[in-house]
Amino acid sequence: MSSTTAKRVAVIGGGILGVSTAVHLLRQGASVTLLTEQGLASEATGRSLSWLNSAGERSTPYHQLRVAGVDRYRTLFAADPSREWLQFGGGLMWNTAGQGDVTEARHAYEQSIGYDSKLLAPDEIAAVTPGIDSGAVPEKAIFNPGEGWVSLPDLVNFLMEEFHGLGGHLVLNAGKASVMVDGGRATGVETAAGGTYPADAVLVACGAATPAVVKPLGVDIPNGSPVSMLVVTKPVEHDVTAVMNTPRAAVRPNPGNTFALDHDWYEEHITEHADGSFTIPDDVVQELADEASKLIAGNPELKPASWKIGYKPIPGDGEPVFGELGQVPGCFVAFTHSGATLGLIAGELLSGEILTGAKHPMLATFRPGRFS
């Protein structure tokens, strides 16, 4: 967009990317309207494992952005380490039996880029991170001490206190929203109910729905979003502090002595209905909880308390999509698989671009124009 400062910004999407960007805009003096289709954190943000990391192999710009993302959470954590919804207990991963060479190769790669990575035998795990059943680890495991986790709904609530304090305007349950365009430029947001919200700039941060929202503008963003589920267990006593990424269950601690669980092996058991809702057999949900129990010292019985199913936002090429649409000046997008890890840094960098027009170099490879 031009270098003229955008004073009024409309943000479509009440997940972490929309809320974070809205708060960063307000901090810089913008007038912000935040519109949600339903409630806050009602879509992917409300069912994210939200493991804060840059483990494994990915493009260098993506890795650098994720590391910066974790850094912003560390700053927030340092301000109050007692927050139950944001903790840094590391991350632990292992592969299936017979894939020890894959694990070792991942560890070597992480070391080569300076990512803190420890290769552990099963009997070494207890000395490094508590609460894990080492008998579940068939060969070697990787422990990444610098990783953490966040409960995104709690973070959204935390940020929304500042949003309201800074005078942000929240429009809940607005239904489907579309970008208004005049003279080829974004001029605001219109809802299906007929509400209009004029703005100098618009951010579309609707998770997996983002490509559908910008498609009427003549913009094609490939969408690779799969259906996924997040399960929250009933409270159970445990000592786990690390996020675990394992062949049959991904597990993280969650406020209130509960666990958050997800994976992908059960996707074939999920049914999508004509009204957009999803169902899964109860016994499949319990099977995931049983798999998680095997990872925890003492193998406590885990019972699902709730589960949410929906689309997990993943751009078609796997890389984030951040920035202004070349076809529609004044309209920006935020669409990424790593919404949790990038939530704070993306809001910071996008707000700067929206208000100044200066493109941040860390977002250079993630522009939506790469699909044109």
Image (cartoon, rainbow, N blue to C red):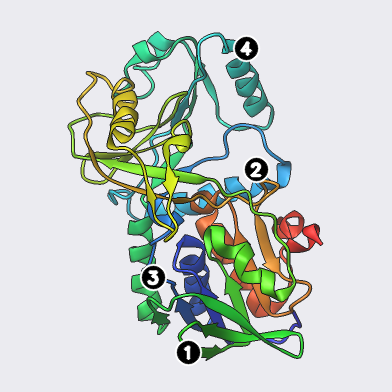
In primary-sequence order, the first of circles 4 and 1 is 4
For the N terminus, give its image quadrant: bottom right
Amino acid type at mark 3: Gln
Gap in angstroms between the C-alphas marked 4 and 2 = 23 Å
Q: Are marks 4 and 1 in contact (CB under 8 Å)?
A: no
Find numbered disc 1 in the image and state the secondary structure of the residue it sits on. loop
Amino acid type at mark 4: Asp
In primary-sequence order, the first of circles 1 and 2 is 2
Gap in angstroms between the C-alphas marked 4 and 3 = 46 Å
Q: Quadrant of residue 276?
A: bottom left
Find numbered disc 2 in the image and state the secondary structure of the residue it sits on. helix
From the image, tell me which residue sits under label 4.
101
Q: Position of residue 330 (x, y in %)?
A: 69, 80
Q: Position of residue 199 (x, y in %)?
A: 59, 88
In primary-sequence order, the first of circles 1 and 3 is 3
Left or right, 134 with reference to 35: left
